[in-house]
């Protein structure tokens, strides 16, 4: 009887801690407020919120159910008008409220896309610029494993280098009483020109016929790990085993000692090229990423799980011999 009780505690703890307990931690390192939006895939349980405010320097953690899938993005320059309608200059979901309530981001918007516990029990995730770019974003897995389980994102401010024909501009005061033009976001070529060759549609609707354009190459050059067009899978899709948690950072700061960071994280930050099979050191190592790993929620869950197992074993042994 005691052994049955022990194994019940052991397996129930492993199941609920390892499979059900997943989290996404959002961190805003921008010099401005970001309003994250959330859209769950069809047929999966929604997260507790579909949109919230994240002030400069603020962090928020959201728990996710097993096998969740969906996307996150950052909305910027948001406000509420005199009628109480909420809207954002970039990434707006059109709900008229802080919560997106099942609506997605209006392009251009930088997207982080996830499928948890997918094929083979792996998590699949990416950062996509297919719908354009509006804010820097970094995704860091915590506690996972696998050669392709590493950070991804777009940490370059593409608004500065965006071609003029793709820019989404606003007019602001220049501090001297005049007006200045500021780029808020950068459209994809598909959004800007609505041509099949840019949208990978019609006769260009397959990997064989839809190739990188001069515009998508600009995105890829600046952010080599992010999706730059619809069929940019080989270098842009990442996978993790062992049910990690994830930290999503808006406007991460580049690590000033990249070489040192790589040496400390060689195993977890090394990726294998799907096409060539060659191994290359990751260039996506940023300030805070290694510190976040060392104190990750997954590590804490593992420690608490081990303590529970030890206590359960001790209790059963006492019961057995008393």
Image (tube, helix red, strand yellow):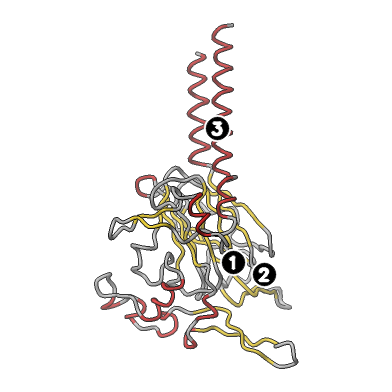
Query: In the rendered view, does 274 fall on the left or right side of 298?
Result: left
For the image, the number of numbered tags is 3
Depth check, front residue: 140 or 166: 140
- Tell me if residue 261 comes above or below residue 160 in the rendering: above
Image location of residue 140, percent across then percent down: 51, 55
Front position among marks 3 and 2:
2
Depth check, front residue: 205 or 275: 275
First-in-chain label (1 vs 3): 1
For residue 223, the mark is none
Depth check, front residue: 68 or 45: 68
Element at badge 3? Answer: helix
Image location of residue 301, percent across then percent down: 56, 38
Image location of residue 205, percent across then percent down: 29, 73
Element at badge 1? Answer: loop
- Tell me if residue 292 comes above or below residue 185 in the rendering: above
First-in-chain label (3 vs 2): 2
**Residue at x-position 40% and y-position 80%:** 215
Residue at the limit of the structure toward the bottom, as seen here: 178
Residue under label 1, please give it.
251
Residue under label 3, please give it.
305
Q: CA distance from mark 2 to mark 1?
A: 8 Å
Image quadrant in which the C terminus is located: top right
Task: Look at the numbered discs 2 and 1 and tell me whether their residues touch, using CB distance below 8 Å.
Answer: yes
Residue under label 2, please give it.
31
Q: CA distance from mark 3 to mark 2?
A: 38 Å
């Amino acid at each position: 009887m005691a052994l049955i009780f022990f194994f019940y505690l052991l397996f129930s703890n492993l199941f609920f801690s390892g499979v059900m307990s997943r989290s996404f931690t959002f961190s805003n390192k921008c010099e401005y407020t970001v309003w994250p939006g959330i859209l769950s895939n069809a047929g999966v349980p929604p997260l507790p919120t579909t949109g919230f405010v994240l002030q400069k320097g603020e962090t928020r953690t959201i728990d996710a159910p097993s096998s969740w899938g969906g996307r996150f993005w950052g909305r910027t320059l948001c406000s509420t008008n005199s009628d109480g309608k909420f809207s954002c200059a970039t990434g707006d979901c059109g709900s008229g409220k802080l919560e997106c309530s099942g609506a997605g981001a209006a392009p251009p918007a930088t997207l982080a896309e996830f499928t948890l516990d997918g094929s083979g029990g792996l998590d699949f995730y990416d950062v996509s610029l297919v719908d354009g770019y509006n804010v820097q974003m970094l995704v860091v897995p915590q506690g996972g494993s696998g050669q392709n389980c590493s950070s991804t994102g777009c940490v370059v401010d593409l608004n500065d280098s965006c071609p003029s024909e793709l820019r989404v501009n606003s007019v602001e005061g220049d501090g001297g009483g005049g007006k200045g033009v500021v780029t808020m976001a950068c459209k994809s070529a598909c959004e800007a020109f609505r041509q099949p060759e840019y949208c990978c549609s019609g006769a260009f609707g397959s990997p064989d016929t839809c190739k990188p354009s001069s515009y998508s190459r600009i995105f890829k050059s600046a952010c080599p790990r992010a999706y730059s067009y619809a069929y940019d899978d080989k270098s842009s899709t990442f996978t993790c085993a062992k049910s990690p948690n994830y930290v999503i950072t808006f406007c991460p700061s580049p690590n000033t000692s990249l070489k040192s960071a790589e040496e400390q994280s060689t195993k977890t930050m090394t990726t294998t090229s799907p096409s060539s099979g060659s191994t290359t050191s990751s260039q996506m190592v940023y300030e805070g990423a290694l510190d976040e790993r060392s104190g990750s929620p997954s590590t804490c869950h593992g420690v608490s799980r081990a303590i529970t197992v030890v206590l359960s074993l001790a209790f059963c042994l006492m019961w057995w011999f008393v």
